[in-house]
Amino acid sequence: MRITTFYDEQDVAKALLGVLHETGHALYERGLPAAFARQPVGQAAGMAAHESQSLIVEMQACRSDAFLAFLGAGLRRAFGVPAAAAAPANLARRLLGRPPVGRWSLHFRRNPSQFSVAKAMRVLGYRPGVDLAEGMRRTEAWLRAEGYLQR
């Protein structure tokens, strides 16, 4: 099996995702039944199926936090990249252009709102596990640990 792709030294993310996309094609080919190789039943279902499998690898699996954590660990081992730079949240920002915090966070900062849980308590029997102050402390700690907030 052969994988062909391009490499742009000025755009590492494009090069990386291009290689991962082509890897999706290779994985699809590897998954075809070997017992039926060179027979119609053992060939790809068509270009649409082939491309869809590659896009699942490129656009879903390789943009996931789990993959970014795996990539970060590899960058640290192979190139000595500092832990903060190799953190999934930082890789998402730097390589994928994903914002560190979702677009709704800006909306909520500009438009402060209050929401009551009274109806959920009354109708569903909901009871908060922590009070608001503790929930805010936990949320801030998580955002800092994930690299969404600077120290």
Image (spheres, rainbow, N blue to C red):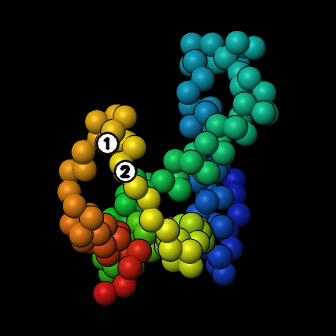
Judged left or right of residue 25, residue 86 is left
Tally of numbered tags: 2
Residue sitting at x 68%, y 74% = 8
Q: Kindly identify the residue that appears in the image at 21 percent across and 50 percent down.
A: 129
Q: Quadrant for residue 40, please give it.
A: top right
**Mark 1 lies on residue:** 121
Instruction: Identify which residue is drawn at 56% across, 74% down.
Output: 111
Q: CA distance from mark 2 to mark 1?
A: 6 Å
Q: Residue at x 50, y 74 (%)?
A: 112
Amino acid beneath label 2: Val
Q: Residues within 10 Å of mark 2 (few under 14, many from 20)?
A: few
Residue 63: image x %, image y %? Answer: 53, 56
Cβ atoms at labels 2 and 1 below 8 Å apart: yes
Image coords of residue 47 (percent x, y): 79, 33
Residue 149, compared with residue 136, is above or below; it is: below
Q: Secondary structure at mark 1?
A: helix
Report x, y in % for residue 80: 32, 79
User: Which image quarter is the C terminus in?
Assistant: bottom left
Is residue 150 rendered to the left or right of residue 110? Answer: left
According to the picture, the residue beneath numbered tag 2 turns out to be: 117
Q: Residue furthest right?
A: 47
